[in-house]
């Protein structure tokens, strides 16, 4: 039986904690507007709101783990 391959896009976006939870970055964090120093990159309030990681929703965990090969 062949090995399962990890979805390369999913491996860049999600990670699994030691307890088995799936974490993701909040939206709008991967673009070039990561810093709010210039006026075109957005307000500091928006960047503070989007900082950090959050858990993947319960409805999506099964699908994400399948893409990660877990």
Image (tube, rainbow, N blue to C red):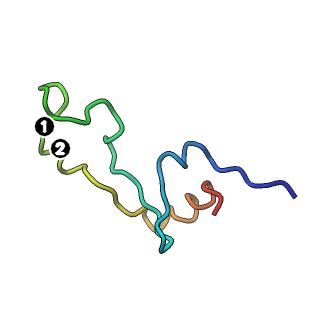
The percent coordinates of residue 31 (x first, y second) are 33, 33
Number of other residues with Cα within 10 Å of mark 2, as a class: few under 14, some 14 to 19, many 20 or more: few
Q: Would you say 37 lies left or right of 60 here? A: left
Image quarter in which the C terminus is found = bottom right
Q: Residue at x 30, y 29 (%)?
A: 32
Q: Count the labels in the image.
A: 2
The percent coordinates of residue 27 (x first, y second) are 34, 46
Q: Secondary structure at mark 1?
A: loop
Q: Secondary structure at mark 2?
A: helix
Residue furthest to the right in view is 1
Q: Which residue is mark 2?
A: 46
The answer to whether marks 1 and 2 mark residues whose Cβ atoms lie closer than 8 Å is yes
Q: Pick whichever, 3 or 57, lies toward us.
A: 3
Q: Would you say 30 lies left or right of 62 here? A: left
Q: Is residue 56 above or below residue 13?
A: below
Image quarter in which the N terminus is found = bottom right
The percent coordinates of residue 60 (x first, y second) are 50, 61
Number of other residues with Cα within 10 Å of mark 1, as a class: few under 14, some 14 to 19, many 20 or more: some
Q: Residue at x 20, y 35 (%)?
A: 35
Q: Is residue 61 above or below residue 25?
A: below
Q: Pick whichever, 42 or 32, lies toward us.
A: 32
Q: Pick whichever, 57 or 24, lies toward us.
A: 24
Quarter of the image for residue 24 reads: bottom left
Q: CA distance from mark 1 to mark 2?
A: 5 Å
Q: Residue at x 19, y 44 (%)?
A: 47
Residue furthest to the front in view is 18
The disc at residue 43 is: 1
Q: Pick whichever, 65 or 20, lies toward us.
A: 20
Q: Residue at x 28, y 54 (%)?
A: 52
The percent coordinates of residue 59 (x first, y second) are 49, 66
């Amino acid at each position: 039986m062949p090995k399962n391959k990890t979805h390369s896009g999913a491996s860049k976006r999600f990670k699994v904690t030691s307890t088995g939870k799936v974490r993701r970055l909040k939206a709008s964090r991967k673009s070039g507007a990561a810093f709010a120093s210039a006026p075109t990159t957005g307000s500091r309030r928006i960047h503070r709101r989007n900082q950090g990681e959050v858990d993947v929703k319960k409805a999506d965990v099964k699908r994400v783990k399948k893409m990660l090969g877990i």
